[in-house]
Image: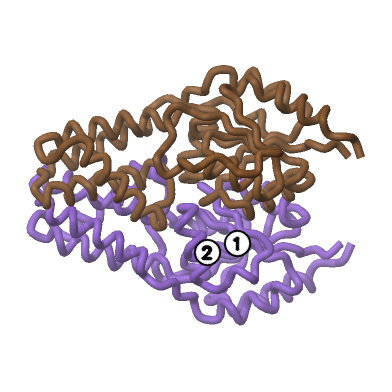
Chain colours: A brown, B purple
Amino acid sequence: MRLLTTIGFDADDTLWHTERVYRLTEARFAALLADYAETEDLSRRLLETERRMLQFYGYGRKGFMLSMIETAIDVTGGRVPTSVIRELLSLGHEMYADPVETLPGVRETLEPLSSEYQLVLITKGDLLDQEQKLARSGLGDLFHAVEIVSDKTAETYRRLFARHGNGPDRSMMVGNSLKSDVVPALEAGSWGVHVPHPLTWALEQADPPQDRQRFRQIEQISLLPEIVREITSEMPEK
Amino acid sequence: MRLLTTIGFDADDTLWHTERVYRLTEARFAALLADYAETEDLSRRLLETERRMLQFYGYGRKGFMLSMIETAIDVTGGRVPTSVIRELLSLGHEMYADPVETLPGVRETLEPLSSEYQLVLITKGDLLDQEQKLARSGLGDLFHAVEIVSDKTAETYRRLFARHGNGPDRSMMVGNSLKSDVVPALEAGSWGVHVPHPLTWALEQADPPQDRQRFRQIEQISLLPEIVREITSEMPEK
């Protein structure tokens, strides 16, 4: 049996831009509330709300919208006018109109890999958000399977790489989040390839892994086939 | 091969109460806005907002919270005070604290079926909402698989009953929504068992199916084993 059969890909900021629309919306949120608080304070308070509500809201646009509204009320001691809340809802609605823009080289890189490996999209976030983005990205045909999960742990990767391949040790996970994509995949015994993105949400940051044997880092996704070749030629066929 | 191998179950208001907390919250929403509009008008406007935003928000508590806030602002022409928006957020937070209460006879009915059939939970809604409710329901161990989907069409049932069984014609779907659980399952060629619930969301209502050969209706879930027995004894073994 081949020693690498499955490659998992994160979606947001690995295959397409996501964080930038959140950052842009956050800047507009701060501008709307500029009369009430400093930008930096607003960002900190928003992040606090997101962190506190994460267990209820999970990831995605709806939770972000609710967190903006809640922070706006809290930070102004309830003095924020309703017209501003209305504006915050509109900012949220505009996020839904944001086009899905794939990162450079994504399609060109994944297409040849898809004929040799089972590609699986493994993404956290809101179910409908992610289905809509995948449909709009035009990448849907490249994936053998799509798994939208509420969290990414070592157990998640063990389960999904058993379902869509030959177990975690014959699988690789590729993504921009050390915390969600790389570290737990390594813990499950898979390869973990980190493709850093200049914008990564504060709650997704983590230290690089200690055990670096199956860890790789590349500057952009177009370097992935090289990593795959290097790894598969290193491994003796059993 | 056995002629019925898989039974799919809807979750909300089939296995546990859901709609009642939405109705209760809606009544409190109307009470909070009583100075601005008639209850009936408020309910109608809220439903309109939910319907309009369904393609973006999908199902679940977060979308409902956002729809309440949006309706409150619209219906008052922006005159609703921020303190009421704050209250609406709190109503939403209280929905998350609502305990998951299974409907009468659910565990007793599913437990013996689970040793003979593959039971699959097939539910629409917010991913995290539904995972949390399943965990709190204590029913998780009865299911061979859990599928949380953004919509339920005939194609959904074809795909899921192929994945978790022997295709739609050897499968049965059980639920309280004619529109989502019964009609599309019948269309896929499965058995469709309707267990009406006194509270069913307006957007889930539909006419009973025309083709009644594989359609059954029972008053409560404890009558399901009888239906299963009747069906399986009718069908000649191939």
Q: Please identify the quarter of the rendering in which residue A219 is found.
A: top right
Residue displayed at 80% across by 63% down: B3
Observer-nearest residue: A34 or B3?
A: A34
Q: Is residue B158 visible?
A: no
Above or below, comparing residue B130 to residue A228 in the picture: below
At label 2, which amino acid type do we have? Answer: Ala
A101 horizontally vs A24: left or right:
right
Above or below, comparing residue B141 to residue A124 in the picture: below
Query: In the picture, which quadrant includes the C terminus of chain B?
Result: bottom right
Residue displayed at 55% across by 62% down: B10
**Label 1 crowding class (10 Å Cα cut-off): few <14, some 14-19, many 20+?**
many
Q: Is residue A143 visible?
A: yes
The earlier-in-sequence mark between 1 and 2 is 2
Q: Which of the numbered marks, if any, corresponds to residue B11?
A: 2
At label 1, which amino acid type do we have? Answer: Leu
Of all chains, the one bearing label 1 is: B
Report, in whole angstroms, how far the alpha carbon at label 1 lies from the one at label 2. Answer: 7 Å
B97 horizontally vs B127: left or right:
left
Observer-nearest residue: B202 or A159?
A: A159
Image coordinates for residue B205, horizontal then vertical, percent: 44, 57
Image coordinates for residue B21, horizontal then vertical, percent: 34, 67
Q: Quick one: which residue is furthest to the right in this view?
A: A238
Q: What element carries label 2?
A: loop
Q: Name the residue under label 1.
A: B121
Above or below, comparing residue B209 to residue B77 in the picture: below
Q: Is mark 1 on a helix, strand or loop?
A: strand
